Image: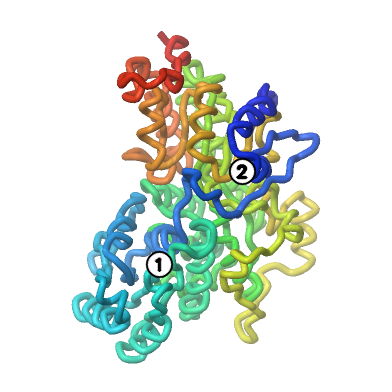
Amino acid sequence: MKKVINNGNKLKGDILEKYPTKVARKRSKSFVVNDPDNPPEIQANVRTVPGILTQRGCCYAGCKGVVLGPTRDIINLTHGPIGCGFYSWLTRRNQTRTGPEDDNYMTYCFSTDMQDENIVFGGEKKLRQAIQEAYDLFHPKAIAIFSTCPVGLIGDDVHAISREMKEKLGINVFGFSCEGYKGVSQSAGHHIANNQIFKHVVGQNNEEVEGKFKINLLGEYNIGGDSFVIENLLERCGITLVSTYSGNSTIDQFEQSHMADLNCIMCHRSINYVADMMETKFGIPWIKVNFIGADATAKSLRKIAQYFDDKKLMAKVEKVIEEEMVAVEQTIKEVKPRLEGKKVMLFVGGSRAHHYQYLFSEVGMVTVAAGYEFAHRDDYEGRKVLPYIKVDADSRNIEELTVEPDPERYRPRKTEEELKQLEKKGFTLRDYEGMIPEMESGSLVIDDISQYETEVLIEKYKPAVFCAGIKEKYIIQKMGVPLKQLHSYDYGGPFAGFIGAINFFKDIDRMVNTRVWALVKAPWSEEGVEDNCLIDADYVSEVA
């Protein structure tokens, strides 16, 4: 049964009235109260108001940190000051597994370490030297070059240097114009990364991949070992995973990914471009899946099996689901009495603020407010709004590739008749309904939430747990509210699949029901500052 969250409109009004009129007018469009009977239109992917503390990351972070970071055998070389390279090194807990002869450069930090004189006189010479040095030391299959803000400002041509070194070294060297200031958030970096991977890597190897049911998994980054869990489930079902973009991935897998028969998208925002381009060029359809949550995992496995329309595959999938659900149901039975009815707030990137609502709902927890760091309108309202999204100057700043069917390799994986049969059975391709339709009536949906808005919401709602990233973690915990990082999982995880759901339920149960939060007193409160920020952690009394 759907729940109704009360006082959403009043709370929104109270928060916005503290802003200057112009700021309040702008924030109002990105701050909506959900009404299932009349779904709201939300403003997203617009620049953060100057002076407001935002959760967002930069374009470089999205390109290097999110999309290319989890690929183990490409040397990711940051052209810029050492701070950018160092901060983007191993911060997301992306994991990988290598064989005895495989290369793994994820544990290294590569940077040109630009100095003042490079900013004044140019850094191209230093970039050439860095590429040569990396090649001489490691002899990698590929080197990727990432531009930071100073590189864009002084005009170093990373693409020309990449072409020059590619010809000289005989390996794949390619660059990304992903300066941090490009776009309004890390979303621009995802788009730039996917474009370059598609242009320079996908389709480079036409060797056939063995397997009857071959898929790619897009938008899964193996944080805390999530990909390992999904890989295991797919293997037990008899499904061949050709490549993952980009958790636990290699450049060889990217090169052969056009040999798959279906693309499955986890994080829609970070990678829907690749799915669209692969369908246009090679004829591979795509579906939206979600492996966060036990029920969601079961639905996704069944959807993949339905696409291939094979009875043996469907039987295997059902057997795996049945085996896994025993432990899941036992854990839910154990923790649900301690978690049911407690309030959750989620403000994280990609599709995570959407996906994790499934997990919380499985133990009866209620999401009262949620939003994304770098979403576009379709991530909230579904792909049906794509034709109505206005293209602004920031969007035009990102290259749009024009893709056409490959004259030799385009091969529709399903006939028109087969597609019609699937549609008759309720199967949907190329669709994502977004986060808003599945949220409670009266819940708050907030794009690019500010620190001020976060603090007021916590004060008013007193959530049992708040999900965000490292930048918010310690401030919120000092307010007496446990914060679960969903960008790196702190030191927990994996949270994907059935075993991931069990891990998550136990983790949240420990966080929410420990009594330590009742002992927290914010430092600003102890130093004589007005005590209006400290929260009465009423959820603690519920379990005392």
Identify which residue is drawn at 65% across, 76% down.
411
Instruction: Measuring from the top left, give residue 217's x and y in whole percent.
Output: 51, 58
Amino acid at circle 2 = Val
Residue on which the image places disc 2: 23
Q: Quadrant of the C terminus?
A: top left
Amino acid at circle 1 = Cys
- Left or right for 25, reference 53: right
Please tell me which of labels 2 and 1 falls first in the chain. Answer: 2
Asked if residue 319 shows in the view, the reply is no
Are there few (<14), some (14-19), or many (20+) residues within 10 Å of tag 1? many
Between the residue at mark 2 and the residue at mark 1, the CA separation in whole angstroms equals 27 Å
Q: Quadrant of the N terminus?
A: top right
Q: What element carries label 2?
A: helix
Instruction: Measuring from the top left, give residue 25's x and y in whole percent.
Output: 67, 42
Identify which residue is drawn at 54% across, 41% down.
449
Residue on which the image places disc 1: 149
Above or below, 396 against 482 in this view is below
Report the front residue among 476 and 123.
123
Identify which residue is drawn at 42% across, 59% down.
61
Judged from this view, the residue extending furthest toward the left is 137
Report the front residue among 190 and 522.
522
Give the foreground label among 2 and 1: 2
Asked if residue 56 shows in the view, the reply is yes
Marks 2 and 1 in Cβ contact (< 8 Å): no
Q: What element carries label 1?
A: helix
Are there few (<14), some (14-19), or many (20+) residues within 10 Å of tag 2? some
Instruction: Measuring from the top left, give residue 511's x and y in whole percent.
Output: 38, 25
